[in-house]
Amino acid sequence: MSWEIPKIQYKGKIREVTLGTGEKAVTVGGESCYPFHDFEGEIPSPPVIAYEIWDHAPQNWPEAVRKPYEDVLKSPSDWAKKCVQEYGANLITVQLLGIDPHGINRPVDEEIRIIEEIVKAVEVPLIFWGCDDVEKDASVLRKIAEVCEGRNVALAPVADKNYKQIGASAIAYKHVVIASTPIDVNLAKQLNILLLDLGVPENKLLMDPTTGGLGYGIEYTYSVMERDRIAALVQEDEKLAFPMICNLAKEVWKVKEVAIPVSKDPKMGKEEERGIMMEAITASLLALAGADILVMRHPRAIGLISELIEELGA
């Protein structure tokens, strides 16, 4: 008697969302089964990796992750071009940390000039990620929506305190919004409902469940993402049936374990290998939890995850 893999028929389906336009456009979502369970349903679009760049030269990055970009760190547009031309990026996330009122606090007009240079430099889809200050994010992302008309970019993070301002601009200029909530299924559903009621089209919404790095809350993030997918696929909750994006790079590379010198703690191993593996393992866990877009930093870590996704056949 031959053994057959038990199969579950899921009634729900994740909606598809497209970023960018034309031949460079990237579509995510559309799955009708759990991550990598293609023996039970369809996975039309495998998880996608978005290369991370910053809007200014980072000061506190570990040497291991500075090296691949050391010649372009002072020019965000050149940084974006290097990701595309040298590393083959087909999606880029721009971290707008220069606008942070508690940091550089760059004025909106000055930030927009940098954004326009990036937009002109590359044709791949772009995600613009704010600094988590709800007021500054709203003012900058609304202006980005205007200057990026026709590019179908994604705007993040959209929170419950600024969803009306950012959502209205996204609707007006036909962009994607990323609903960001603090690792909670009910809050995620509530924000999705608010954005949909505002008029955001169902094919213009991504979910950011919020993530921690390996050893810093990843198990909690995994559990919440898993529950999101159960609700969408098994319970047919259409308010949670949206693709998920995980902005993980900045969470991984800020922890002390990626920078501790091997001379101080030999059992930790070489710093570069350690950081790369921490980012790759974090990304692999999030992909298994259901992430459709992974925001990553180190090219070698990205290479490892790309191979894993291909190997798993999604």
Image (spheres, rainbow, N blue to C red):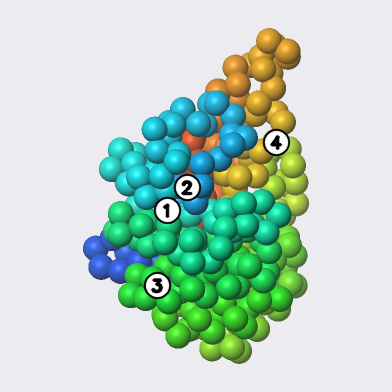
At horizontal 72% and vertical 31% (from top left) the residue drawn is: 256
Q: Which mark is residue 147?
A: 3
Q: Which mark is residue 53?
A: 2
Q: CA distance from mark 4 to mark 3?
A: 35 Å
Mark whose residue sits in front, 3 or 2: 3
Asked if 165 appears above or below 41 in the picture, the reply is below
Q: CA distance from mark 3 to mark 1?
A: 17 Å
- For disc 4, the marked residue is 255
Amino acid type for the residue under numbered disc 3: Val
**Disc 3 crowd, CA 10 A, few/some/many (<14, 14-19, 20+):** some
Amino acid type for the residue under numbered disc 2: Ile
Q: Say which label, 3 or 2, has the lower sequence index.
A: 2
At horizontal 63% and vertical 67% (from top left) the residue drawn is: 136
Q: Position of residue 206 (x, y in %)?
A: 54, 68
Q: Say which label, 4 or 3, has the lower sequence index.
A: 3
**Disc 1 crowd, CA 10 A, few/some/many (<14, 14-19, 20+):** many
Q: Are marks 3 and 1 in contact (CB under 8 Å)?
A: no
Q: Say which label, 1 or 2, has the lower sequence index.
A: 2
Mark whose residue sits in front, 1 or 2: 2
Q: CA distance from mark 1 to mark 2?
A: 7 Å
Q: Are marks 1 and 2 in contact (CB under 8 Å)?
A: yes
Asked if 58 appears above or below 234 in the picture, the reply is above
